[in-house]
Amino acid sequence: MPVNVRNAEMVAMLAGDFQARYEPQFAWKSACSAFLAPIGVRGFWPTSSFDENGDLIDLSGQGNDLTLNGNPLYRMDGLAPYVVLDGTGDYFSNGGGVGSWCDILGTEAYVANPRLGVTVAGWFRFTNAAGAAEYMISKWDTGGNERSYVLYRQIGGTIRFAVSVDGTAIVGIATTGTPAADEWFFAAGRFDANAQELDVWYNDEVSNLAVGVPVSVRSNATDFILGGRHGGAGLMTGRLSLCALYAANLPDAIIGQLFQQTRAMFGV
């Protein structure tokens, strides 16, 4: 039986006629649609759109813009838009008050049972070495029963996703891999209320927790924040881009495609 052999020279020759999967321009034109296509998108902040006050505009169509705090700077890295956070007052929040749009419990009657839960995702780049915990996406405080869900870099450098059922008890799972300073990476956290599982992604590496995970997440008055946690604490030093919140647990294949379809923009 004849065996077809991949002809690398032919592939290179036809690159101008056929779209390569790993190609920055292709990733660039597909990025926003990739993050907006999954079900349950509650907010999507690509960092390409900001208003006259520097506030971060939500492209989901739901108007969940985030207020600028401090002096973040919007920039581009090749084709990738991003915002620079200096770790000393820079973060984005939902206007200093609770919003029902970010109060996602995993018990919503309008979401089909297999998809109940919460997913957060985005691209990040820390410009400092790991030290104190730095928060990337959060609806989280450290006291007063004010914890819901959070994605952050731990003291040792791994990325952790955690939730709380009552605002006090914490269940979380961390990555095995550790992003280096000045390295763009994709991260996502998922709470699956149906299967009672937690998952966290570092690029295409996924870690899973299936023991002791609650059936719902606590509702509270804590701000939703990019680049920190409630009250402007635990601030991130680095860059963020293409951040999203979903009122659903997205399938592995979808989260994997968020990474695969956009990674060429970030050179990953």
Image (cartoon, rainbow, N blue to C red):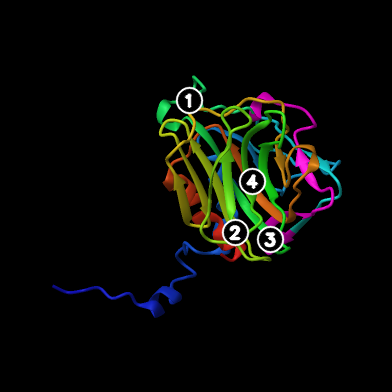
For the question of whether residue 33 can be seen, the reply is no
Q: Which residue does the numbered mark 4 point to in the structure image?
A: 243
Contact between marks 4 and 2 (CB within 8 A): the answer is: no
Asked if the stretch drawn in magenta spans residue 55, the answer is no
Which one is in front in this view, the residue at disc 3 or the one at disc 2?
A: 3
Considering only order in the chain, which callout, 2 or 3, is on the residue closer to the N terminus? 3
The residue sitting at 41% across, 73% down in the picture is 11
Specify the amino acid type for callout 2: Phe
The residue sitting at 39% across, 78% down in the picture is 8
Q: Which residue does the numbered mark 3 point to in the structure image?
A: 130
Considering only order in the chain, which callout, 2 or 4, is on the residue closer to the N terminus? 2
Element under label 1?
A: loop
Which one is in front in this view, the residue at disc 4 or the one at disc 2?
A: 2
Classed neighbour count for the residue bearing mark 1: other residues with Cα under 10 Å, few (<14), some (14–19), many (≥20): some
Classed neighbour count for the residue bearing mark 4: other residues with Cα under 10 Å, few (<14), some (14–19), many (≥20): many
Specify the amino acid type for callout 4: Cys
C-alpha distance separating marks 3 and 4: 21 Å
Classed neighbour count for the residue bearing mark 2: other residues with Cα under 10 Å, few (<14), some (14–19), many (≥20): many
Considering only order in the chain, which callout, 4 or 1, is on the residue closer to the N terminus? 1
The residue sitting at 28% across, 76% down in the picture is 5
Q: Where residue 65 appears, x then y in whole percent?
A: 73, 35
Classed neighbour count for the residue bearing mark 3: other residues with Cα under 10 Å, few (<14), some (14–19), many (≥20): some
Q: Which residue does the numbered mark 2 point to in the structure image?
A: 185
The span picked out in magenta is: 76-102
For the question of whether residue 152 can be seen, the reply is yes
Question: Residue 229 falls in which quadrant of the image?
Answer: top right
